[in-house]
Amino acid sequence: MYLQHFGMHSMPFALTPNTEFFFGLAPHVEALQVLQVALQTGEGFIKVTGEVGTGKTLICRKLLNELSDEFVCAWLPNPYLSPQELRAAVAQELGIVLDEVRDQLHLTGLIQQQLLALSAQDKKIVLILDEAQALPDDSLEALRLFTNLETEQRKLVQVVLFGQPELDQRLAQPAFRQLRQRITFSYQLRPLQREEVGAYLRHRLAVSGYQGRPLFNPRAQKLLAQASRGIPRLINVLAHKALLLSYGAGLEQVSDKHLRAAIADTEDATHASDWRWLWTGTVVLVLLVAVGLLKGVAW
């Protein structure tokens, strides 16, 4: 699409969490530091919550990449599992052959044996769950019971929960007070501030190979920060659309006009009241031009 036009070698604002684009902004660095310190202590649950699109999965993957060899990680990216499915998933991550399992009691015993064997090798076992707000209630209780497994010196497994704010609301219920008391460290991701949005844009463009003059002027950065509410995923969506529109118009920079069109075309963006009707159909038309489906039509 616009890569050659802007001199880039990769998409700067793809939605797939890619640790190559990780940028050391305060909320993400602080979250990683809390996680690393908490894991070194070897106790209980660790929780990171944040609104949709604030970068939880990216931090999760960054953590997985940076943990030393002393850690054995079981990562469950989709935790919508029954207690039985949860135990089976953990067992698989720990290298247990499920074909040999007779029943749930046997499976629990095999998991405990494997945890003890890894602990004897001075390994720290970490169970990491993304999208933890989707865990059924009985599976949350099964997680708590996992942390009951311990030696005289330490817990056999630590649990890291990444989730949306709904996770905090669920854990606030009286039924989860035992689990809540075992959360030794927690961190709440905040959206990016206005000046951080500009740094975020420049970083991702640089990683993608862009070397020209700024594509987003200060006014565009302010507009983008307001419309995205500082949420990285929305920043990516809006910046990507704005670049497509600018490419379709043959421009070398993103104009306010095209950024406003991108904002008006994005469902969850914060819209000024008079933008949406003004730009209806504009984005579709320019995108068609950008991909060559309306060649020869002047925009």
Image: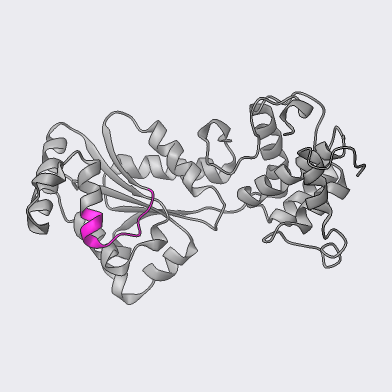
Q: Is residue 34 magenta?
A: no
Q: Position of residue 280 (x, y in %)?
A: 83, 60
How was the colour assigned to the protein in this rendering? one colour
Relative height, residue 70 to residue 190 (above, below): above
Identify the residue at image location x=48%, y=60%. Answer: 164
Which quadrant is the C terminus positioned in?
Answer: top right
User: Which portion, as a residue range, is magenta?
Assistant: 77-87
Identify the residue at image location x=74%, y=56%. Answer: 227
186 relative position to 193: left or right? left
Residue at the farthest right position: 298
Residue at the farthest bottom position: 174
Identify the residue at image location x=54%, y=30%. Answer: 20
Q: Which one is in front, 22 or 258?
A: 258
* Residue 244 seen: yes
82 relative position to 38: left or right? left
Identify the residue at image location x=82%, y=50%. Answer: 285
268 relative position to 105: left or right? right
Q: Position of residue 217 (x, y in %)?
A: 83, 39
Relative height, residue 75 to residue 210 (above, below): below
